[in-house]
Image: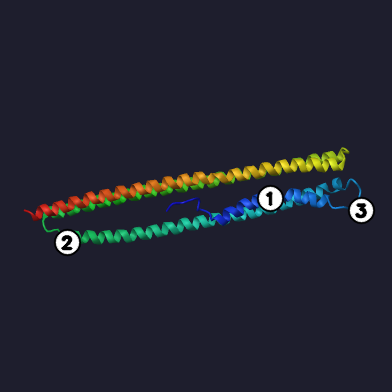
Amino acid sequence: MKMNFNTMSTKSKQYLVSSLLALSLIIPSIVFAQTTAPRTGLKSGLFCDRISELESKIKDRMSSYQTKLEEKRQERSNILENRVNERNTKQEDNRTKWDANRQEHFAKLQAKAQTDAQKQAVNNFIAAVEAAVAKRREAINSAVLSFRQAVDKAIADKKAKTDTALTEYQNSITAAFEKAKSDCTNGVDPKTVRENLLSSLKTAREKFRNDIQNIEKIKNSIQAAADQRQGAIQKAIEEFKLAVQKAGQELRTAFQNQQGQ
């Protein structure tokens, strides 16, 4: 089964990206909403008076988004684990059925063998087929394991990079507010403080958005791993077919030679 980063649904990926990008938009909306409305009779220093309140609201909103992000991560992790378990169970069930069918076929061949030479030919065929089955399964198991390890690594890398981007964004916001509060304390004009704060938040927001959008590009590595897995599985299947065909031809030749004697 070819995989195009289907380890998570498109809806889940879109939710993750939109949630993170929405996080970058709450900053200016709160600052503008709290400072641009006309207020008759209010002091010119209103912005400085309310700066700690604005910072608190922004950080509360960020905390809420982070909580939702962690919940979504856990939901995706559970979905992935369930899918892997379902595929493992289905694979084991199929292999059990194939093993039973193969043993039934072997029994029929053994029943047809009359001479020692024919019996030996059947035994050789059985040994060759079983060896081919074992080789195919080992190759497929190895390909699937490598793919899952690549997926796990990509997910872990993405989480680490996302967390780093979030931490840097939070640090930038904290630094911007600390500078604004310091400016207010030092008597800088509130209008200038507000403009400088918004400029700093805008810079932090744009960097965060770029970081998140670049992180999404790791899906390319997942696709590469999926293609590699598919190629390895296809190769294992082709080699298995050739080995069984060769064993079958040798078995037919052995029976024909016996019948011709």
Q: Amino acid at mark 2?
A: Ala
Dot 2 falls on a residue whose secondary structure is helix
First in residue order: circle 2 vs circle 1: 1
In the picture of the structure, the residue carrying the numbered disc 3 is 40
Query: What whole-number distance in Å separates the C-alpha atoms at marks 2 and 1?
Result: 72 Å
In the picture of the structure, the residue carrying the numbered disc 1 is 23
First in residue order: circle 3 vs circle 1: 1
Q: Amino acid at mark 1?
A: Leu
Mark 3–mark 1 CB contact (< 8 Å)? no
Which numbered circle lies on residue 111? 2
For image coordinates 30% across by 47% down, the residue present is: 239
Farthest residue toward the right?
41
In the image, 236 versus 53, the foreground residue is 236
Q: What is the number of callouts on the image? A: 3
The x, y position of residue 40, in whole percent, is 92, 53
Dot 1 falls on a residue whose secondary structure is helix
The x, y position of residue 146, in whole percent, is 43, 45
> Dot 1: few (<14), some (14–19), or many (≥20) neighbours within 10 Å?
many
Q: Quadrant of residue 172?
A: top right
Dot 3 falls on a residue whose secondary structure is loop
* Side of 101 relative to 249 (left or right): right
Query: What whole-number distance in Å separates the C-alpha atoms at marks 3 and 1?
Result: 32 Å
